[in-house]
Image (spheres, coloured by chain):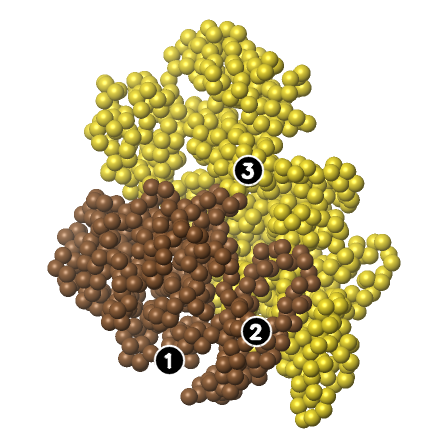
Chain colours: A brown, B yellow
Amino acid sequence: MFRIDANKPVQFCDGLSRRDFLHAGALAAMGLTLPGFLGLKSAGAVSPDKDMNCIFLFLVGGPSQLDTFDMKPDAPAEIRGPYKPIPTNNPDIQISEIFPNLAKHADKFSIVRTLHHKAAGVHDTGHQMMQTGRLFQNGMEHPHAGCVLGYLRGSRNSLPPHVMMPRPIGPTGGNMPHGQTAGFLGKSFDPFLLNAEPDQPGFEVPDLLPPDYISSARIDRRRKLREIVDQSVAQLEANPDARLLDENFQQAYTLMSSETAREAFDLAQEPDVLRQAYGMNKFGQSCLLSRRLIERGVRFCTVNMFETVFNEITWDIHGSAPFSPIECYSDLVGPMLDHGLGTLLEDLKQRGMLESTLIVAMGEFGRTPKINPAGGRDHWPQVWSILMAGGGIQGGRVVGKTDDIGAFPVERPTTPAEVVATVYHCLGIDIETELPGPGKRPIPVVDYGVKPIEELL
Amino acid sequence: MFRTRLRVLLFFMSGAIASATASDFAILPEGIALGYRGAIHTVLVEQRANDSWTGDITGSATFVSANPAVATVDAHGVITAMGDGETTITATVNGQSAATTVTVSGAGAPYTQSFRNHVQPVLFKMGCNTGACHGAAAGKNGFRLSLRGFDNDWDHKALTRQAGSRRVSLASPESSLILLKPVMDIPHEGGERFTKDSEAYRILRDWIAAGAPPARAEDPRVAGLEILPQSVVLSNNAQQQFLVRARYTDGTLEDVTRWAKFGTTDDSVLAVDEGGKATVSGSGAAAITVYYASQVTFARAIVPREKPVDAALFASAERRNYIDELILKQLEQLRIAPAVPSTDTEFIRRATLDAIGLLPTPDEVTRFVLDPDPNKRDRLVDSLLTRPEFVDYWTYKWSDLLLLSSKNLPRREELNSFYRFIRERVEKNQPWDQFVRDILTATGSTLDNGAANFFAMHQETVDLTETTSQTFLGFSITCARCHNHPMEKWTQDDYYGMANLFSRVKLKNGRRGNDAEVFSDSFGDVIHPRLGVPLPPKPLDGEAIPLAQAGDRREYLAQWLTAPENPYFTRSIVNRVWKNFMGRGLVEPEDDLRLTNPPSNPELLDALAADLVEHQYDLKHLMRTIMDSTAYRRSSQPSDPEDPDGKQYSQYIVRRLSAEVILDIYAQVTGVPTRFDGYPEGFRALQLPDSQAGSYFLTAFGRPQRNQACSCERTTGSSVAQTLHVANGDTLNGKLRDERSLVASLMRQNASDDDALDTIYLRALARMPNPEEREAARGVFASLPTEGPDCEAERRAALEDLAWAVLSGKEFLFTH
């Protein structure tokens, strides 16, 4: 039981000093908790914890509806594209041949084929709307659904309520926020960022444990000394950014002293064959890690399939550099989703977790029905498909219908806000719950009048 | 003749506050000219105090027209032209009156709605030509309009020629689809947009009845917008209607409030509805932005805090230069008291960090504190601006801006060449305009002329066009690549005129095999995708040059871009430098200088820009001016705990230091340099030419990737990953454990408890420990064994822990 890190001497991963530290339990006994949430459970606004969880699989780049979940085999070649539909275990649903594994699970998931938005057709706007239910306007940044859940419900244990992995979405061209923070709720409710690649050998949360040479007594001493030094500059206490640093130290201490946390992030405990089934890539292993984390108390996991759309193979198939070619759907990107999501559905089902875990696999927009001169497809917010499963969603359904070329909704158009309302509904949050907005102005979790997608429930 | 003069006069008067009258309110605008029968214009009744507009009392006014045969007025202040002549509209509130004159002309002649100036605004305001409806690239249900009506010819054709000419029926205007559908007489997916008795309906019907004429070349065009009141001081919970007038190229003014689109820059101060009525929600300063016919403008609203502040505080406040005048003016309006001055130790720490990215040494701190010279802060500023580390810091800053990285320039020699180019210019304080001109007109080998790498990094004209405006002008024109910018005045034609200035810069292999050669070719144009032809090269809103004109087009671009008259260029660099020192840009984000994102203190930004121009773009002059101001020298302690953010610079704004600075000052305080792969030991983070140089610490603390020209790449927030790394990672722990560390040398010197403590505090925080801190440290020392085999190791660990506690605290990681 030892591991070798490139820049560290060989060490036992259960080294004595660490065990001492963990067993001492000194920090947990000090009453350190995650920031602020305890007093914030708004009485009556939320129904009792239904113990529901959620996993967002953000298919960054914007998958083409025509090459994934809304095939148009009868359309002309320049519309239908290179892929053929295949049958699934549900006679009413056909999906793209790039998803042979998912085809076995069409009883578990449902497809919404008529997502559309009316904002500018850039990645950032879709990121905002799909994760917060709103387009950011007038200087207002709305919170990610997972951060709202964390704000309303707090943590179950020493693990943070909302984990984002492997990394947040970086710049995608619009220079706008991506809706992946707690926004006006304040940075204390931002997701915990993994910031590491779970497919790498020896993966661990960076710096989760103290090095061997720092004993628990020293950690304790450091913490006490730090608190004294920190009290000496009053103006820093008034500054929210500075206060956040302290909250983050507290959260770090909670994580460091938590055996649950250490165990939860330890992917090496998963059988090799299961890890392989999820796919030995960032996305697949993040799906697996999400399951592990939810099993151990995390409420919400957000998996960003990609961090950018530049110089990386993603769903953003413009066909020309620095973006991706359409072929990557069958070569790389499609199989990643097929294995990651397919295995996740199976795994959750087998463990009896699917009923209590909502999964949303979604992109930020669709793609142009007509293949462009570079052989790719460009941005198309007029329509796209997403997939939802578990957590109270009925499987095997298709909501909405598009026209013959997959260009526009013709039946039951749906909006990002309705998806987010559905998420809140499934998580047991009253969609009229109000959050404290800027200047203490009450802001409902979704705009008044927006309803969950009943057809899925 | 008379009318033209009158219009000119009115134009100058309308924005400003009109001449004083006995009453404490006035009608806005003063003097209205209406050009056809049925023309509508709304007026506001606005309170005034101390030369400021202070509230909308239109709702409590009664209106009377002296001659209803010329113009009528209704209870809401809406004036309708009836017949030629002049009349007076009087508003009465509580027995007091104010008046405005209305002149009507052309009432006898038949009037035709102009496609450009009346029909398009209706289609815009009703949402017909938005991206969500018929303005989408693919149209909607077979009917496509240009986005927000930027293409009159296309739109006219789409309305009158397509769909079997059923959209517009000249024979029977009321049967036109563009009237039947939006009123839902027949199904319309977009729902009901207006009713039959609406003005929108009337305008479209009258235009069709007049034969649906296209936009004519001789139609006046919108030259600009006016908003009234332009600046207003409002109280909490107040409401204020804003009026928008389009100013046409023929000098006429038209009330277009009902067709304009409104927004606000700060929802927490006020919200604005579709009709331009704002409702105050909190105190602060905010702007109301307006978009109409590809033109934008804004008004400013100030909502003072309710609690009064002693006026003497402002009267006696120190004003060291114009910065203080303009900041105090705004603070007084908002009723925010300025903070007290910073202490000497606070100042030397802050100034050194902000100017050169390092901490002052204990020696520097001591000498500064003991120096009795009243001008010592000025002297300190002067000396910081000549330090060699100043060159490192600002070279790094401009390397961020210019995206230097081995990802963008994989050949090390080229990256170094660009880096050297920047460094040499920072070193000699080259004027900013020359620096930018040298980059934009660079030719020759990428190894001989470092700036030529700008063109090696950005080879596509699209990339050059967008990067140039984002980097040097501080705004994005990317939207205009495909259609007129939806929120700004930039049109697709502006974009491709600009792009064509870069069409002839080309690259060939250099002579040395590891370089490229940038040269200006004599042919090549960028084709406008919609028009299918190249447009004459034209820098955004500058003058075009003929397509056939010989010479390097970039010279012309550089000349326009860096001209003192170019408002964006100077403001953009001023705002970047300002943010470096003051913690918050006058415009936020710092590189978002859109017209619809106005500065928090426009007068101050203007004054700083004018000063920089006057001083030939000497950036050190700008830095000195900022650092010399009282505003920069204030304490970071808010004078009022209810205003902790200091958005208006009532205090020095507290913020976390950048990733690179923290890493460098860890090295500085501990005495243990950071090791970067491929660089000699002792190389500081701020000396790295390449943003790809490996460092977990820098990544975790938000170093930008330098992929795109966007200040959003750098993050300065705190995260759990950072705190975990400080607690458990090998960066700070490694430095403290190192045999060369401060702690090790304190051990070697057998430093006493107090000496060790003082040294750590002075080096890290530029101050001595306070009694509580000393007490706590003594407690630690007292607990240590005084003899035995572990004695030395225990003392060493204790010193490391003391240093760690200081180096991980807010006081260390923040500038304040």
- Left or right of residue A164, residue B780 in this image: right
What chain is tagged by disc 2?
A: B
The image quarter in which residue A284 lies: bottom left
Q: CA distance from mark 3 to mark 1?
A: 55 Å
Measuring from the top left, give residue B773's x and y in whole percent: 71, 70
- Disc 2: which residue: B727
Residue at image coords 25%, 33%: B188
Identity of the amino acid at label 3? Answer: Ala
Disc 2, disc 1: CB below 8 Å?
no
Q: CA distance from mark 2 to mark 1?
A: 24 Å
Residue that extends furthest to the left in the rendered view of this protein: A91
Whole-percent x, y for residue B424 in the image = 66, 62
Within 10 Å of disc 2 (Cα), the crowding (few <14, some 14-19, many 20+) is many
Q: Is B596 positioned to the left or the right of A106 in the image?
A: right
With respect to residue A380, does A337 lie above or below? below
Q: Which mark is residue A321?
A: none
Of the pair B196 and B595, the residue shown nearer to us: B196
The residue where tag 3 is placed is B287
Report which quarter residue A180 is drawn in. Answer: bottom left
Identify which amino acid the numbered label 2 is placed on.
Ala
Residue A377 visible in the shown view: no
Q: Residue at x 46, y 27 (%)?
A: B257
Q: Is residue B337 visible?
A: yes
**Discs 3, 1 touching: Cβ within 8 Å:** no
User: What is the CA distance from the residue labelled 3 to the residue labelled 2?
Assistant: 44 Å
In the picture, the disc for residue A268 is: 1
- Please name whichever residue, B93 or B50, is drawn nearer the observer in this view of the structure: B93
